[in-house]
Amino acid sequence: VGAVPQVDELEALGRAAGLDAVGVTSAEPFEGTRRILEERKAAGIGADMQFTYRNPARSTDPGRALPGARSLVVGARRYRRADPPAPEAAAGAVARYARADHYGALRGSLDTVADHLRSGGWRARVVCDDNALVDREAAYRAGIGWYGKNANLLLPGEGSWFVLGSVITDAPLEHSPAPVVDGCGSCTRCIDACPTDAIVAPGVVDARRCLAWLVQAAGSFPVEHRAALGDRIYGCDDCQEVCPPNRAADRRDVPAAAEGDEAWVPLVELLESSDDVLLARHGRWYIAGRDPRWLRRNALVALGNVGDPADARVTATLDRYATGADALLAEHAHWARSQRSQRSRCTEAPDGSLSAPRTDGGDA
Ligand code: B12
Ligand code: SF4
Ligand code: SF4
């Protein structure tokens, strides 16, 4: 093998390939994270998620992903872009990280670093949103950011709109300085803003209540969280939208939306599309069992929450599902119809917001 690459050189290479931050840490197992994963799994907080929860001993040991691993070169890539205009028809909202293939872009950047290491005779493997490694902990150890109370990793002065990944290598690289110190202070905005109270302690998300998991999970959407889903069909950004470091970064500079950014999906159209069309359009997303039925389920709930009560196409679509052969989707369509008719009984306030009609007969 050649000389051990300089960290500056790898960082410059990574940045030129589109990374916004680069750090290096050792490939020692993440013992504390393994214990946390096991504890949360035992407490039920991990729901029935697989991913890194499937085998905590594996997902916290870089040496299992690349035998002989000595270092991790960790990269962060920004995914925040401006919102494209909302369509007129009832539309399902897509979280920012899922509007384009940001993981693919990050992998591409990390591949450049991995190729450079390989060209010097070292071994290198890229992992990013992979079951093989817990990405946030790698980034924390590499000094890229701190753990926010919403569990996301925040970059100093930049916030959390970043996807994270690593190059695991057997090169004995010099490590970055110590992890970044906490930047949340006394703020609790994310905890207060979570629509389902899923942040059960600072840095601890209960997946059983987190909308970002519930839209991905198979099965019935829990009735108690359906109204909170609002117009979302994939992902949830509330605990990041309210975050002051993100807001400060957003005020400074937000790149324009890119061609093809998929921030909205017309709901009736989604519900009228075939499996093939849905998988061709949204197959990049994590959909349990790659079964578009779960996307339809989300769309039915969203249509109940935001579909125009006077729109005949919405009515026809909900009726078709409510009387269809799929009992689970029929139940969601029934819920959506009743949610929609409750909303149509609401009165419109002068500021345009909807409020429920008074039922208490009071005059205060
Ligand atoms: C499973 C998973 C989920 C699950 C569970 C999320 C979770 N909090 O664990 C669900 C489906 C809910 C989810 C949602 C989202 N996810 Co996700 N997800 C993952 C995945 C596959 C594994 C995460 C994991 O192992 N969690 C296990 C637990 C143990 O980790 P943790 O919550 O981070 O726990 C740490 C903290 O608690 C901290 N800690 C310990 N003690 C204390 C004490 C205090 C006070 C604090 C503050 C912290 C702290 O240490 C723990 C262990 O390291 C990773 C990809 C990967 N391979 O790593 C992406 C990943 C974490 N997700 C990501 C994203 C973008 C999201 C969403 C923003 C997407 C969206 N808009 O809908 C949401 C955010 C929800 C949230 N608030 O966390 C990014 C995060 C990027 C970032 N900057 O942090 C990742 C890293 C994907 C990637 N490669 O970029 N995700
Ligand atoms: S992603 Fe949404 S539901 Fe999950 S913790 Fe954040 S605000 Fe709560
Ligand atoms: S909203 Fe406040 S507490 Fe939550 S992650 Fe952001 S800075 Fe930290």
Image (tube, rainbow, N blue to C red):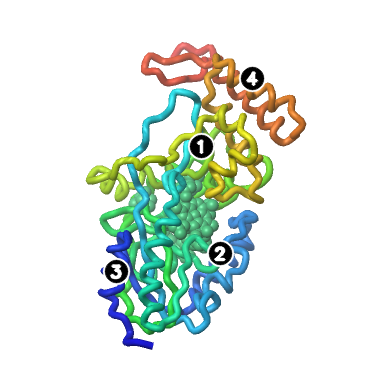
- Amino acid type at circle 1 is Arg
User: Is disc 4 surrounded by few (<14), some (14 to 19) or many (20+) residues within 10 Å?
Assistant: few
Residue topped by disc 2: 131
Residue topped by disc 4: 316
Name the quadrant of the N terminus.
bottom left
Residue 64 placed where, x, y %? 55, 77
| CB within 8 Å, label 4 to label 3 | no
**Counting residues from the N terminus, which is met first, the one under dot 1 or under dot 4?**
1
User: Is disc 1 surrounded by few (<14), some (14 to 19) or many (20+) residues within 10 Å?
Assistant: many
The answer to whether residue 203 is visible is no
Image position of 197 (left or right of 276)? left
- Amino acid type at circle 3 is Leu
Judge: label 2 CB < 8 Å from ligand 1.
yes
Of the pair 141 and 235, the residue shown nearer to us: 235
Kindly state the secondary structure of the residue where label 1 is placed: strand
- Amino acid type at circle 4 is Ala
> Which is closer to the viewer, label 3 or label 2?
3
Q: Which mark is residue 232?
A: 1
Q: How many marks?
A: 4
**Counting residues from the N terminus, which is met first, the one under dot 2 or under dot 1?**
2
